[in-house]
Image (tube, rainbow, N blue to C red):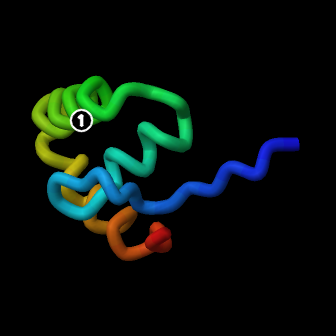
C-alpha cells in the first residue's frame, strides 16, 4: 500500500496545486502545468474555479 498523500508542492508557481498533482501522479511539473493551462482555455476557464477550490482544500506540506 502506498503512503502517497495529495499535498501542495514546494515547487510552486502560484499556489503549488499543479506541482502537488504532478508529484502525486508522478508526472513532470511542466507537462502538468501545460495540460492544466490547455484544459482551462478549452473549458471556458472552468479550470480557474477548480484551481481555487484545490488551493483551499489541499493541505500544505
Q: Residue at x 49, y 69 (%)?
A: 61
The reply to whether residue 50 is in sight is no
- Identity of the residue furthest to the front in this view: 10
The reply to whether residue 14 is in sight is yes
Q: Residue at x 48, y 41 (%)?
A: 23
Q: Is residue 32 left or right of residue 38?
A: right
Question: What crowding class fits label 1: few (fewer than 14 Cα within 10 Å), some (14-19), or many (20 or more)?
Answer: some
Q: Which residue is mark 1?
A: 33
Q: Does 48 appear above or below 59?
A: above
Name the spot of residue 5 as percent of width and height, x first.
63, 56
Name the spot of residue 37 as percent of width and height, x first.
16, 35
Query: Which quadrant holds residue 34?
Result: top left
Q: Residue at x 17, y 28 (%)?
A: 38
Name the spot of residue 59 as percent of width and height, x first.
49, 72
Q: Does 59 appear above or below 6?
A: below
Foreground pick, 60 / 33: 60
Amino acid at each position: 500500500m502506498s503512503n502517497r498523500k495529495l499535498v501542495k508542492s514546494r515547487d510552486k508557481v502560484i499556489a503549488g496545486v499543479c506541482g502537488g498533482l504532478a508529484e502525486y501522479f508522478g508526472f513532470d511539473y511542466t507537462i502538468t502545468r501545460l495540460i492544466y493551462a490547455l484544459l482551462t482555455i478549452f473549458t471556458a476557464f472552468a479550470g480557474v474555479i477548480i484551481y481555487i477550490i484545490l488551493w483551499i482544500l489541499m493541505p500544505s506540506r
